[in-house]
Image: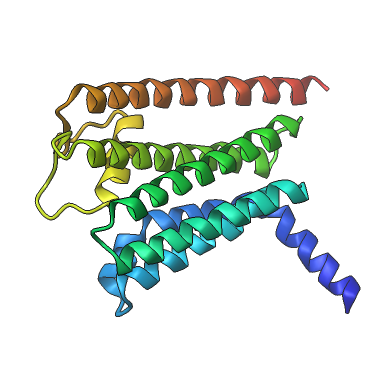
Amino acid sequence: MKLQSIINWKKIIKYKYLIALVAAFNFLLTPVHVAFSSFSASYVVVINYTLVILSSSLLATKKIAKLTTYIIGFLTLLAIWLEFANANSESILICRLVFSFVLFACFSVILIRQLLKIKEISLQFILGPLLGFLYLGILGGILFEAINFLNPNSFQLIEGFSGFSFYYFSFISITTVGYGDITPLTAPAQSLTLVMNIIGQFYLAIVIGVFVGKYINTKSK
């Protein structure tokens, strides 16, 4: 029984990038889940956030890294729950933004360290950069929300916007699509948008370059 559990755990670890990627995509689809389910928005957000934390923690191979992500993840979930109960509390909002940023920054660092250890092209090497791209968009969304918190006039937002609108704008920025439905108005908002545009382009260029390099190295062996 114990041997079977070890084997099953090894299978989970083998597909950790795929599991984390699916969980991250699922998190970005939170508004869709809320719209088509009978559950409260708070339950859906917490469930999806929990899945992201647990799945992304699989990336960590060291106990200290796992423990760090679990602690910060718990604090993030706690802040989310408290925010739903105290929607007008600025201190709780600040805690949620800080914990969320630190959490996904940790995930990004862990992911980068894992990808640097991969010597040849594999499923993990293909899925890893995709997961990193999602982490980048989520981090940008947190920063855009923080800027709007500091100055509510930072963006021209669409009617009926929510906190998810900042994540949407973040991914629009790093992909340089620019629909124009959300517009940065202040200098800090415009500056961060510019930085996200540049990072998005460099990210794709670097990933393609590394991928081609590893492919050539694999073929030359």
Is 131 above or below relative to 67?
Answer: above
Q: Position of residue 127 (x, y in %)?
A: 59, 43
Residue 175 visible somewhere in the drawing: no
Name which residue lies at 15% across and 34% down: 180
Report the coloring of the rendering. Answer: rainbow
Mark count: 0
Q: Position of residue 207 (x, y in %)?
A: 55, 26
Q: Quadrant of the N terminus?
A: bottom right
Q: Report the side of 15 relative to 134 (left or right).
A: right
Residue 129 visible somewhere in the drawing: yes
Farthest-out residue, left: 159
Name which residue lies at 79% across and 19% down: 220
Is residue 126 or residue 61 the one in the foreground?
61
Q: Position of residue 113 (x, y in %)?
A: 68, 34
Q: Position of residue 141 (x, y in %)?
A: 35, 41
Is residue 119 or residue 91 the one in the foreground?
91
Q: Report the side of 79 relative to 146 (left or right).
A: right
Name which residue lies at 39% across and 66% down: 81
Is 115 above or below relative to 54?
Answer: above
Q: In which quadrant of the rendered view does residue 212 lie?
A: top right
Name which residue lies at 36% across and 27% down: 196
Is 1 above or below relative to 15?
Answer: below
Q: Quadrant of the C terminus?
A: top right
Q: Report the side of 190 relative to 44 (left or right).
A: left
Is residue 161 or residue 31 the one in the foreground?
161
Q: Report the side of 7 relative to 152 (left or right).
A: right
